Image (cartoon, grey):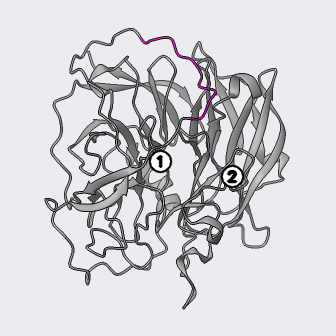
Amino acid sequence: MKAVVCAAFAALLAGSGCSASSSSDAPVGSSEPIATSTSVEREPSTSTSSEPSPAPATTERSDPVPISRGTARIAPRRSPPPPERLPAFRAVKIADANYPSGLAAAPDGRILFSELWGGQIRVIRRDGSVDPEPWADVNARYRIRWTEFFHGGLSGIAFDPNFSRNRFVYVVTQVPDKRTGFAEKTLVIRYKERKGRGTSPRVILTLRAKKFDNTYSLVFGPDGMLYVPNGFLGTRRPKGAHPLDDVYGKILRVAPTGKPPGDNPYGRRAPRVWASGFKNAFDLAFFPRSDLAVAGENGTVGHDEINLLMPGHDYGYPSHEGVTRIRRLTPPLLDFGSRSPAPTGIVYYSGRRYPALRGRFLMCNNDELGMVALRIRRSDPGRLLAMTSLVDECTLDLVQRPDGSVVFSDAGAIYRLELAR
């Protein structure tokens, strides 16, 4: 079954078939740190107990968190670090679903999920049942009809940090070209929930899309801004063009209205750009109260990566993939080399239901790995200390609920993470 799931989603993550240079830059070893700029915080204490403790009451944050800046040193790796000794986990199916490529948890515990090509947003109620009526029908609203199932569809969902007050929910979808059937543009859409349904859709951002490497997620950062990983579209930059002349292969940072916030690192030259040099950074997740984030990267032929994301940094694509000593480029925490696990969704786990996972990043991979726990100390964020496999079924997206539980998906179902008994 997993082979079928991975084969189906591989088209969405596959590269355009042209490899970038990575052999002429005298790459460094995993033990040599490279100085770079970012911010750091102290790592929270974690427990290795296998017994879940009660989840604390959750409150919705209404004010942006100030962001600090500092320095860190990257110690890139060419092979995964050893696993931790963590409790055994299992996947418990909670619902069948039609390609649930995006998941988001409401403050009240509901789960919204998107159907990639079906174009509907559906709801898993707090009791675990699926609402028979869609929360919103994005394809119907925007007259989307997919005939070529490739790099496009309805995916990322994000609740506004002030959802309890403004009821805003943000989604991202591609719209196909009526002639070719492939993605032509990307829409970031803001909905307003009324009586349990998505209403009043408003497009806040429109991006160009193509056959490859589009935009599949969107995330609110600790600063209250919306972060949008925009793929490189499977194209090459025109000869002589500056890397900041376009928004392709960038992490965009915009206000909840879609407008530039005015304090991005490149100023007026690239007012929406926060970081650059990505082929297809499918998703990202922040350390709490920090401008540090972690993301997977899907390479061309091999060179999938795990990156520490920092404002104003260039991660190399399309001129370079993998580990590098080029000073203007930021190397990855991990270069998978010839392997292609195809990283997808990622979250920072801050709950108390699974104490052994607290303070780890949990990341889905569409091939080989499933869900892995990444240990990265906030006091030394440039080192990936451990990577531990948890369950096979996490191939698309995952989310932490307010009660500390973790929900995740593959192409045909949605699951809950549980301790193995």
Tally the marks.
2
Majority secondary structure in the magenta region: loop
Assess disc 1: are there few (<14), some (14-19) or many (≥20) residues with their C-alpha within 10 Å of its C-alpha: many
Residue 363 rendering spot, x and y as whole percentages: 38, 42
| Residue 36 is a magenta residue | no
- The residue pinned by badge 2 equals 173
- The residue pinned by badge 1 equals 284
* 1 or 2: mark nearer the eye: 1
Residue 371 rendering spot, x and y as whole percentages: 35, 39
Identified at 20% across, 60% down, the residue is 33
SS label for mark 1: strand
Image position of 312 (left or right of 120): left
- Three-letter amino acid code at the position of disc 2: Thr
Q: Nearer the viewer, residue 382 or 357?
A: 382
SS label for mark 2: strand
The relative height of residue 242 versus residue 156 in the rendered view (above or below) is below
Magenta residues span 55-64
